[in-house]
Structures are given as C-alpha cells and as structure tokens.
Image: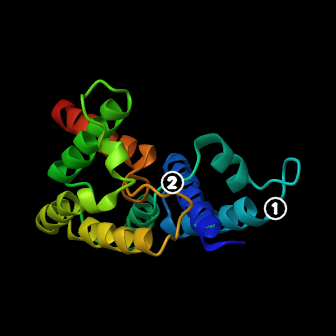
Amino acid sequence: MRTADIIADLANLAFLQLILILFLNFIFKNKIIKFLLMMLFAIFALFIHCYQGMTVVNLERGIIGDLSLSGLLFLSSWSIIYFTRSSIDLFDRRFCLIIVLTGLILYLSVLDIIPFDIYAFGYLPRSILLLIFLFCMLFLRLNYIFAIIWVIALIAFFVKLQNSVNLWDYLIDPILWLLCLYKLFIREHRQDIS
C-alpha cells in the first residue's frame, strides 16, 4: 500500500471516529469506555472486510473521497485534546471564521461565481505560497496548532504524500470546513440561547 493511500485511509478513519465519539457522547459519559470502543471500531473499520472485499474506511473513502492531510492532523489533535482533557481550544472563533471564509471563497471560485479561480492556483503553488505563509503567521496568533498543521501539510505537498497535485487539497477539505462552520455558527447560537 502506498503512503498516499495510508494517509487517506487514516484521514477517513479519523472522520469516522469523530462521528463515533459524537454518537457515544449520548450513550456513555466515561471517556475510557469511549476510547476503548473507538479503538475497537478502528480495528474493525481498517481491517475487517464487510462489503465485496472492502473495509468500512474504503467504503467511506469511496463516498466522500480523500480528506486533506490538515484535516487528518486536525481531527487527530482534537481527539488527543478530547481524551487528555486539555484546555486547548482548537475551535477559536476567529480561526473557524478564516477556515469558513477560505473554503467559501474556494468553492465560489470553482463554481465561477468569483471571477478568478483560486483553486487553480493550487496547481502552481509558487503563486500562492506567500498567501499560505501569511495564513500560517495569522494562525500562529490564533491557533498555533493549526499553524503547525499547515506547515506540515505544506511539507507533505512538496514531498507528494497524498494523491492530489493541488496544494489546496492538502490544506482544507469539506469535512474540516463543515466542522468549522458548525463550531462557528451552531455553537455560538447555542451559547446565545443558554
């Protein structure tokens, strides 16, 4: 198995485990039980063939595609912080706003609603490296963990650790965008209600 496929499988597993943790929050309060169930699910999802020789991770990867390396690292960081009860807030409001706006601009540019295609610049990353560097400097002030994640993703892009040849596919994906969108608007709305 190639390194790019291993990273893609791990990223999709991280997303499935996020869903599992959110579901288990309704059933169990003990984090040790949730951690053990998450590990059992990881073994099942990665190694047990359940449908026409495909694992659960392969099926999910076929449905939503490859997730970004930064999404994998972000979800892994969130999981570590969740289980260690650390007080680090990965979902700073300003950070989520930047990710949501970046994803929205990328999506609108791909649909030709915006007159220039920012996603196409990802195929020629030298043209946007200054922009990504500025984002990383901004993230150092807002969310230093994500700044480190984007630097790792940049290095991974240059050594071609994923299947994509577009830099944006290493930096942001729809799952990370939706998670930040949820944390930005739904969480804020719930805090206003209570």
For mark 1, what is the residue? Answer: 48
- Which of the two residues, 182 or 139, is positioned nearer the viewer here? 139
| Name of the residue lying farthest toward the top | 113
91 lies above or below 145 = above
70 lies above or below 113 = below
- Which of the two residues, 103 or 109, is positioned nearer the viewer here? 109
Query: What SS does tag 2 mark?
Result: loop
Amino acid type, label 2: Leu
Q: Residues within 10 Å of mark 2 (few under 14, many from 20)?
A: many
Residue 125 screen position, x and y as percent: 32, 60
Q: Residues within 10 Å of mark 1 (few under 14, many from 20)?
A: some
> Would you say 27 lies left or right of 53 here?
left
At a point 38% along the width and 63% down the height, the residue shown is 74
Is residue 85 among what the camera can see? no
Q: Quadrant of residue 135?
A: bottom left
Residue 128 screen position, x and y as percent: 24, 57
For mark 2, what is the residue? Answer: 67
**How much space separates mark 2 and mark 1, taking CA atoms?**
21 Å
> Would you say 127 lies left or right of 77 here?
left
Amino acid type, label 1: Ile
- Which of the two residues, 26 or 73, is positioned nearer the viewer here? 73
Is residue 53 among what the camera can see? yes
- Which of the two residues, 89 or 142, is positioned nearer the viewer here? 142
Nearer the N terminus, badge 2 or badge 1? 1
Q: Select label 2 or label 1 by which is in front.
A: 2
At a point 28% along the width and 62% down the height, the residue shown is 126
User: Where, quadrant-wise, is the N terminus in this rendering?
Assistant: bottom right
User: Where, quadrant-wise, is the C terminus in this rendering?
Assistant: top left
Dots 2 and 1: beta carbons under 8 Å? no
Query: What SS does tag 1 mark?
Result: loop
